Image: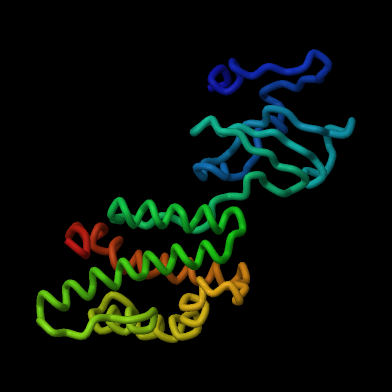
Amino acid sequence: MANQLTDDIYTMKTVKTVSLDDGISWEQVECPHCGSSPLFVVATALDGNINVDPNQRTRWLRCPHCLRGSLLDRGTMHPAPVPLREPGGLPADVAAAWSQVRQCLQVGAPTATVLVSRAILRRLAAGADAADQAAEPGTERCTGLVGLVEHLVAEGYLTARMKVWAERLAPAVDAADDLAVTLEPATARDVASFTLRTLEAFYELDEVMGEGSADS
């Protein structure tokens, strides 16, 4: 593993070295790209003291799993870890959109986070409405975040408590494309977390139970 991690790395001749067996050669942190741990320390700035507080060090890291690099600078990881998770069973278009939501959160883009989350929720609403129309022609289509949640509660996908959360988030979701509205990062995180819970209920449970996609 050491050769794979180091054979393609070149350093300046003036740098000092430590043994691969040294305790500072590995960091017990997660890779911001793939989530693996620990990470190999390619280089570290110790300010002349090998026992310096880890939160006062600057470390250049490499993941032994994906081989991508990152920087841990005085306790802050760069790039920031991708937040939340990808639930199982997502169709390709939903998976791509959910990846965009996570990336928007990662770079601190709250409005984009909410806009893409809203697009995902509308995709779910379209699937739920299509199922209703097939079962009962003339059934009124779901509208808005609250309407979607009410439908999914009635169908048993979500619990009634999710409706309370939807009512709180609906103003932000509905106004995401209004230039006069400034969305806070915490609100965007809540909307994305709500979207994740909905995706888990809509798709992942069926995959776990081996019953196929919920909209198939």
Looking at the picture, the colour scheme in use is: rainbow
Q: Is residue 115 left or right of residue 149?
A: right
Residue plotted at (24% across, 81% down): 141
Q: How many numbered marks appear?
A: 0
Q: Residue at the right extreme?
A: 48
Quarter residue 97 falls in: bottom left
Residue plotted at (32% across, 81% down): 143
Q: Is residue 108 left or right of residue 73?
A: left
Q: Residue at the top extreme?
A: 13
Q: Is residue 33 left or right of residue 11?
A: left
Q: Is residue 58 above or below residue 195?
A: above
Quarter residue 128 falls in: bottom left
Along the line of sight, the residue nearer the viewer: 58 or 209: 58
Q: Residue at the front extreme?
A: 179
Along the line of sight, the residue nearer the viewer: 65 or 95: 95
Residue 170: % across, % down: 46, 81
Residue plotted at (44% across, 65% down): 117
Q: Quadrant of the C terminus?
A: bottom left
Q: Is residue 178 above or below residue 167?
A: above
Residue 3: % across, % down: 56, 17
Q: Is residue 132 above or below residue 193?
A: below
Q: Is residue 69 above or below residue 103?
A: above
Residue 55: % across, % down: 78, 47
Residue 38: % across, % down: 58, 38
Residue plotted at (10% across, 78% down): 135
